[in-house]
Amino acid sequence: MNKATKNTINAVLDKYTLANIAGMGYQVPAEETPLCKLAFKYRTDKCEKIKHPFTSFYYDLLNSQRWSVGKVLEIGVKIKRPGSHFQHITGPSLYMWKDFFPFAKIYGADVDPQVMFQDGRIKTVLADQSKKGDLTNLIETTGANIDLLIYDGSHLPQDQISTCLRLMPLVKKDVVYVIEDVIDLGIEKKLRQFDTHLISLRASNGRRYRDDKLLVVRNAASWA
């Protein structure tokens, strides 16, 4: 990743983090980004039309890398819910990332065999996040050169922490690692060996969820 792109990402993180320090959280604008539209198209709960306002932040953070990201890994693959008008496809966010990053390989990992599939640039891998060996095998399958790693697995703080601690040493040093659905703000202290940015978001539609928070984790030396 070149210096200009790193500077852009650093500036975005500073903007959102300052809003959180002020105690209000970042007010997401009402205007939909292209990523928000993709999220709603595939019915992932990362967009505020369905639940969380995450895609507005992701667009700010990642749009400058849209054509250069080569590999994405997301922990947690949502299964299709029969009869649901919200989630009508397995792996909705994987399809969202595929469309947003046109040259990237998209990997999803999950413990549930029912959500395993392959479709073009999308591939899923069976892995139990609680098992160190599974995570090691996962990165052997995907390769360590992951640009974006999203954790949308178990919401238990201990799982969010342990998975991050196990995966970060296995992937490339300038990876952007994002933990979604953060409830316990104490996990930031547990990951203090890294450069962390807590992102608290306020949806434009006024709806608030306790876990409308993300934690961005990076290796500080690679982002100076």
Image: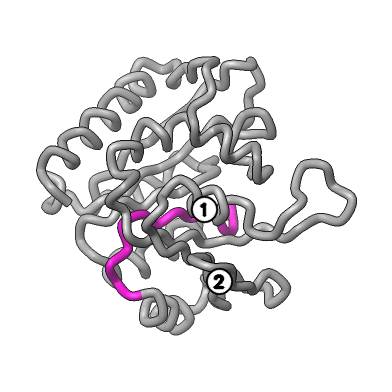
- Closer to the observer: label 2 or label 1? 2
Against 180, residue 150 (above or below) is below
Q: Position of residue 51 (x, y in %)?
A: 66, 34
Q: Is 45 one of the magenta-colored residues?
A: no
What residue is disc 2 on?
Answer: 124
Q: Which mark is residue 157?
A: 1
Q: Position of residue 180 (x, y in %)?
A: 50, 46
Against 131, residue 100 (above or below) is above
If the image is split into quadrants, where does the C terminus sit?
Answer: top left
> Which residue is at 32% across, 60% downward?
70
Against 140, residue 107 (above or below) is above
| SS under mark 2 | strand
Most frequent secondary structure within the magenta stretch: loop
Say whether residue 92 is left or right of residue 152: right
* Mark 2–mark 1 distance (CA, rounded to whole Å): 24 Å
Q: Position of residue 48 (x, y in %)?
A: 62, 29
Q: Hey, which residue is sitting farthest right in the picture? A: 83
> Which residue is at 55% across, 56% downward?
94
Q: Which of the 4 quarters of the picture holds residue 156?
A: bottom right
Q: Which mark is residue 93?
A: none
Residue placed most toward the observer, 80 or 152: 80
Q: Badge 1: few (under 14), some or many (20 or more) residues near its Cα, within 10 Å?
A: some
Q: Callout 2, which amino acid? A: Thr
Q: Callout 1, which amino acid? A: Pro
Instruction: Write the start and end of the magenta stretch as one range.
Output: 143-155
> Which residue is at 13% across, 38% downward?
4
Say whether residue 113 is left or right of residue 38: right
